[in-house]
Image (cartoon, helix red, strand yellow):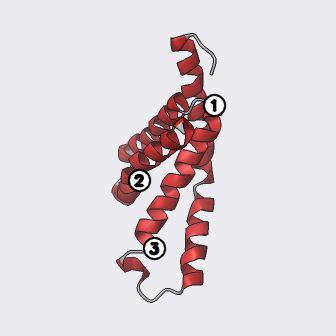
Amino acid sequence: MRFGIAVAVAAVAQLFVYVRLAGWVETGAILAVSYIALAALGAGWFAGRRPALAGALSVVLGVALYGAVTFFGPAAIGMGAVDLVLGELRLVVAYWPYALLGAAAGATGGWLHRRVTGRRR
């Protein structure tokens, strides 16, 4: 239960960045990636078990939510169902480096939680 909630909350937090990412350049892009990593770190902190998986899944779910907002909104007028599904899959595959960053940040969040609280999950 904690795992799913942690992943979902971090994904929704990342949705804002994904929606606004197109307008962010130079320093703003660094801040956006930092925000994504911080949200994944939070997912790893609160996940309980498998913090690296929680961080990576938070990024993947965030991108999937972004795709749903993009492809099922006004931008999808005239697209067929196959185009929508393939567009969503292409978007998720394109963000795999961020998923790796999310896994590293989630593992760091889990390590910090164990270090701060002094207990194993």
Quarter of the image for residue 88 reads bottom right
Q: Is mark 2 in CB contact (under 8 Å) with mark 1?
A: no
Q: What residue type is labelled 3?
A: Phe
Mark 1 or 3: the one toward you = 1
The residue located at (47%, 48%) in the rendering is 11
Q: What residue type is labelled 1?
A: Arg
Q: Is mark 2 on a helix, strand or loop?
A: helix
Q: Is mark 1 on a helix, strand or loop?
A: loop
Q: Name the residue under label 1.
A: 49
Say if 84 sits above or below 60 in the image.
Answer: below
The tag on residue 71 is: 3
The tag on residue 15 is: 2
Say if 70 sits above or below 44 in the image.
Answer: below
Q: Position of residue 35 (x, y in %)?
A: 42, 40
The residue located at (51%, 36%) in the rendering is 43
Which of the image's four quarters has the N terminus?
Answer: top right
The residue located at (58%, 75%) in the rendering is 85
Estimate how packed mark 3 is, as few (under 14), some (14 to 19) or many (20 or more) residues with alpha carbons within 10 Å: some
Q: Is mark 1 in CB contact (under 8 Å) with mark 3?
A: no
The tag on residue 83 is: none
